Image (cartoon, rainbow, N blue to C red):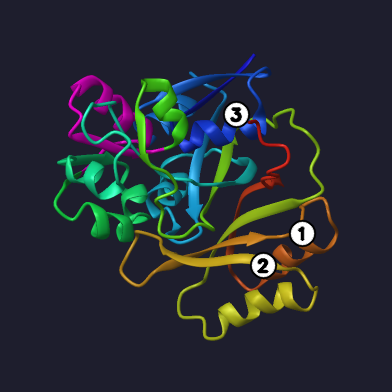
Amino acid sequence: MKRIALLGPGTFTEESAHYVLGTDEFEYVNCKLIADVFQSTVNGTTDYSVIPIENTFEGSVTLHVDMLVHEVDLPIQAEWVYPISINLLRLPSGEGQGTELEAACGEIRKVYSHSVTLAQCQRFLRKFLPHVELEQVGSNGEAARLVRELGDPSVAALAPIGAGVLYGLSTVAAGVQDHQNNYTRFVLIGQEKPQLKASPQQKTTILITMPEDYPGGLHQVLSAFAWRRINLSKIESRPTKKRLGNYYFYIDIEASMDSVLLPAALQEIEAIGCQVRILGCYPTYSYDPEQAEV
C-alpha cells in the first residue's frame, strides 16, 4: 500500500485527501510541519506528499511553492480543489455554551490556528474576538490538539469541524471565514504515477526562466501558447533567488504533454533561449458536493 504524507490529523489537507483519494488504497502519514511532509517523501519514508499550494483569496502559498521549486525534485502527480469552511472550536464549558455568540466569544482569551487560516478570518476576529491573543501553529489540526491538551475553555482554535470531532471540541461558530466561496488547491507530489480515478481534465505546470536582457521575451513566450490556442490558467513570477531582479515564471497550462501542440510550444520557447522545467503533467479534480460524505 502506497504511503502519503500530509499535515494532520484534523486538517483541511487530510479532509481533502480522504475525499479525493479515499482511505482504502493509501496509508496516510501525519506530520506536524510542512517541511516534514516534503522531507518524508524526499527520503523515501512515504511515496507521496499532499501540499496546499493556492487559496481563492490568499493566492499562492509562496512558502510551499518555493519549497516545491527550490528544495525538492518531486513531480506533481495530481491536483484537486476543495472547499474550506473554518470553525471556531473550544472545549465544552458550562458558562457560555449555548448562549449568544458575543457572550461565548467574550470568554475566549487566546486562539490558535495556522497563519493562512488566521488571514482568512480577519473580519470575524475583528468583530467578535478583537481582545484575544492570536498564536500561529504548524497546522489547524495542531491548533485543535493544543486546545484539547491545555484543557482551558478560554482557549480556542480555528480549524475544520473534523478536528473538533477528533479532539472532542465544541463549535462556538461555524463558517467564520471572511468569504464563503473559499477554496484551496492541493497537489500530490511524488516520483511515481499513482493509480487514481480517471479525470477528463489534465494540466501541466512548468517553470520558464528567461535569458538575461531579452527585450520582448515574455511576449514571445506567451505568443507560443496564444497562436496555438493553449489556455494558461495561471502565470506568476517568482524570484530565482540567484540575484536581485532575476525571476522565473510559474505557469499552469490547461493541456497535457501527450497532446501535439504543447510539446511544440515548449520547443519554440526553448528555441528563443528560455529554460523550461516541467513540474508535472497530471489529472485535476473538482469538488462535487453531491458526492461529499455526510
Q: Position of residue 154 (x, y in %)?
A: 17, 34
- CB contact under 8 Å: marks 1 and 2: no
Instruction: Tell me how far mark 1 sits from mark 2, CA to CA.
Output: 14 Å
Residue for badge 1 = 263
The percent position of residue 82, horizontal first and vertical second, equals: 58, 45
Please state the extent of the stretch shown in magenta in the rendering: 135-159
> Which residue in the structure is indicated by mark 3?
18
**Height in image: 222 above or below 66?**
below
**Residue plotted at (29% across, 26% down):** 92
Eye-nearest disc, 3 or 2: 3
**Where is residue 49 shown, x and y percent of the image?**
52, 32
- Give the quadrant of the C terminus: top right
> Looking at the picture, which amino acid does disc 3 mark?
His
Query: What kind of element bears circle 3?
Result: helix
Tag in front: 3 or 1: 3
Is residue 126 rendered to the left or right of residue 75?
left
Is 128 in front, or is 102?
102
Crowding at mark 3 (Cα within 10 Å: few <14, some 14-19, many 20+): some
The disc at residue 66 is none
Earlier in the chain: of badge 3 and badge 1, it is 3
Q: CA distance from mark 3 to mark 2?
A: 29 Å
Q: Is residue 143 magenta?
A: yes
Q: Amino acid at mark 2?
A: Leu
The single residue placed furthest to the front in the displayed view is 99
Occupied quadrant, residue 8: top left
Q: Nearer the viewer, residue 208 or 200?
A: 200
Q: Which mark identifies residue 232?
A: 2
* Residue sitting at x 30%, y 46%: 100
The mark that comes first in sequence, 1 or 2, is 2
